[in-house]
C-alpha cells in the first residue's frame, strides 16, 4: 500500500473523525466523571475490530511502584480502556499509542463563547473543553488505525491504544498500564504541542498547605488567628523558592535558554466560613515544576524546608499550625534519548506530510511519557496537533492540523510496525 492511499483514507474518513471527536468532547470527563467518554472510546475501538481490555485502577497494584503519585480521591469508577490492534504474531516493531481521556474543569461558563461541552466548529477550529487537550489526539490514533484497516491492512505487530484516566493530576492511569504489563518498542502520545516533538519535559509536584486559625468574632479580630491571612506569607515564601529553582536553570541544558522553566501555580484556595468571623481554616493547593533528572525526594525536601523556615520566621504562620500534604502529581521530568529509531521514523513521517522538518521543543509541562520512558526504557514520543488555550476558555483544536497529524500517525504506524493484509 502506498502512502498516498493511506492519506486519502484519512481524508475521506475525516468528517467521521470530527463527528466522533464532537461526541467525545460532549461527554464531559473531568476527574471522576470519565466513564461515559471511556465507554464511547471502548465502543468505537471495538467496532473497528480491536480487542478491548478494561483496566480498573487498583491502588494496591501501583502504590509501591516508582512513578506513583499520592491521591486523596477514590478510584471506584476509574477505568483505562485499551484497544488491542495489530498482528500479535507479526514481526514488526510494537507500539503503544497513549492518550488521556480526562479533562480539566471548564471554569465559569460566562468565559466561553460557546458551551465547553457543546463543541462548535468556527473557522475550521473545533471549540470545547478537551478538543485539544487531548481528545483530538485520541481520535487521531483511532482514525489512523481505521484508515489502515479500511485500506485492507493491519499493523504487523501488536499496537495498544490506551485511553487513560488521571493524566491531569497524577499519571496513575498510565502507571496502571505499565503495572499491567503493557510494553512495546515505542510509545506515541498525542498531546497538543503544535506539531512539534517534545524532547524534554519537566516533572511536577502537587502539594497542599492546610492552616488552622483561631476563630473569633470580627469585632475582636486582633485576638484571633486568621488562617486566610496567614496564607499570604506562605505564598510569598514559595514564590521565593520558585525564583531560586529558576536560577538553577543553567545546570539543565534542555531548559538553560528557557525564560522561566519552573512555574509555581497557586491553583486553588479555600478558606473561611463567614465574613464576620476570623477564618478558622484555609487550604491552598500548589503546583510546581522540577527539572528532568531532579530527584523527587530532594525537591520535596526543599518544599518542606521552605515551610519550616516560614514557621520559624513568621509568628502568624507558626500560630496557624501549617500541615503539608502531597495530594497529586509526584512525577519526574523526562528527556527523550537522542537519535532513537522511533524519533527518526516519526521525523520522516512528519516531513512526508508537512514538507518541513520536525521541530523539537522542551516544554514546561508534564505528560504521561515519563512512565514509558523512565520506567520501561521505551522511547516515548510526545507529538500532536495545533490548537490553543488548553486549560483556558475557548479551547480549540485546529482541524487541518488534526487531519495532518492523523496522516502522520498512519504513516508512522505503517513504517514503524509494518503492515500486513487483513
Ligand atoms: Zn494533556
Image: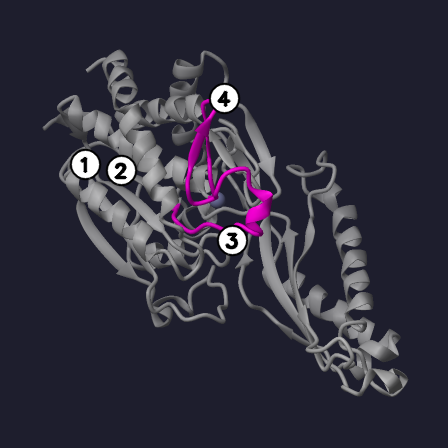
Q: Would residue 186 be found to the left or right of residue 254 on screen? A: left
**Residue 240, percent across and down?**
81, 57
Exactly how many numbered labels are in the figure? 4
Q: Nearer the viewer, residue 168 or 44?
A: 44
**Residue linked to disc 1:** 86
Quick one: SS at disc 3? loop
Badge nearest the viewer, 3 or 2: 3
Label 4 and label 3: CA atoms lie apart by 32 Å
Q: Residue at x 38, y 20 (%)?
A: 349
**Residue 132 visible in rendering:** yes
**Residue linked to disc 4:** 358
Decide which of tag 4 and tag 3 comes sooner along the chain.
3
Magenta segment boundaries in residue numbering: 100-129
Q: Would residue 128 be found to the left or right of residue 361 on screen? A: left
Decide which of tag 1 and tag 2 comes sooner along the chain.
1
Q: Which mark is residue 94?
A: 2
Residues at marks 3 and 2 touching, judged by CB atoms closer than 8 Å: no
Decide which of tag 3 and tag 2 comes sooner along the chain.
2
Badge nearest the viewer, 3 or 1: 3
User: For residue 313: magenta?
Assistant: no
Amino acid at each position: 500500500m502506498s502512502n498516498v492511499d493511506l492519506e486519502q483514507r484519512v481524508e475521506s474518513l475525516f468528517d467521521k473523525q470530527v463527528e466522533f471527536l464532537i461526541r467525545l468532547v460532549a461527554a464531559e470527563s473531568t476527574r471522576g466523571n470519565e466513564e461515559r467518554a471511556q465507554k464511547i472510546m471502548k465502543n468505537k475501538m471495538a467496532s473497528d475490530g480491536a480487542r478491548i481490555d478494561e483496566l480498573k485502577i487498583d491502588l494496591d497494584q501501583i502504590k509501591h511502584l516508582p512513578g506513583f503519585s499520592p491521591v486523596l480521591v477514590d478510584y471506584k469508577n476509574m477505568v483505562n480502556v485499551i484497544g488491542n490492534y495489530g498482528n500479535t504474531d507479526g514481526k514488526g516493531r510494537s507500539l503503544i499509542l497513549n492518550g488521556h481521556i480526562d479533562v480539566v474543569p471548564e471554569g465559569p461558563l460566562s468565559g466561553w463563547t460557546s458551551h465547553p461541552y457543546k463543541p462548535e466548529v468556527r473557522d475550521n477550529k473545533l471549540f470545547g473543553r478537551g478538543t485539544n487537550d487531548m481528545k483530538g489526539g485520541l481520535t487521531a490514533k483511532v482514525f489512523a488505525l481505521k484508515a489502515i484497516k479500511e485500506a485492507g491492512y493491519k499493523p504487523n505487530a501488536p499496537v495498544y491504544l490506551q485511553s487513560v484516566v488521571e493524566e491531569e493530576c497524577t499519571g496513575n492511569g498510565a502507571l496502571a498500564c505499565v503495572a499491567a504489563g503493557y510494553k512495546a518498542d515505542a510509545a506515541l502520545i498525542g498531546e497538543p504541542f503544535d506539531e512539534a516533538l517534545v524532547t524534554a519535559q519537566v516533572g511536577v509536584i502537587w502539594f497542599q498547605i492546610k492552616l488552622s486559625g483561631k476563630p473569633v468574632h470580627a469585632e475582636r479580630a486582633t485576638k484571633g488567628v486568621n488562617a486566610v491571612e496567614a496564607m499570604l506569607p506562605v505564598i510569598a515564601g514559595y514564590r521565593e523558592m520558585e525564583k531560586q529553582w529558576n536560577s538553577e536553570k543553567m545546570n539543565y541544558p534542555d531548559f538553560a535558554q528557557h525564560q522561566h522553566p519552573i512555574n509555581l501555580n497557586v491553583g486553588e484556595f479555600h478558606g473561611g466560613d463567614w465574613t464576620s468571623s476570623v477564618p478558622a481554616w484555609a487550604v491552598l493547593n500548589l503546583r510546581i515544576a522540577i527539572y528532568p533528572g531532579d530527584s523527587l525526594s530532594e525537591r520535596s525536601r526543599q518544599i518542606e524546608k521552605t515551610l519550616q523556615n516560614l514557621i520559624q520566621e513568621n509568628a502568624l504562620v507558626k500560630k496557624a499550625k501549617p500541615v503539608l500534604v502531597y495530594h497529586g502529581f509526584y512525577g519526574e521530568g523526562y528527556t527523550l534519548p537522542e537519535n532513537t529509531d522511533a524519533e527518526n521514523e516519526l521525523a520522516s513521517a512528519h516531513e512526508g506530510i508537512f514538507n518541513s522538518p520536525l521541530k523539537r521543543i522542551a516544554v514546561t509541562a508534564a505528560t504521561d511519557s515519563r512512565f514509558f520512558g523512565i520506567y520501561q526504557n521505551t522511547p516515548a514520543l510526545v507529538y500532536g496537533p495545533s490548537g490553543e488555550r488548553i486549560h483556558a476558555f475557548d479551547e480549540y483544536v485546529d482541524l487541518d492540523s488534526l487531519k495532518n497529524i492523523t496522516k502522520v500517525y498512519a504513516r508512522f504506524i505503517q513504517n514503524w510496525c509494518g503492515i500486513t493484509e487483513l
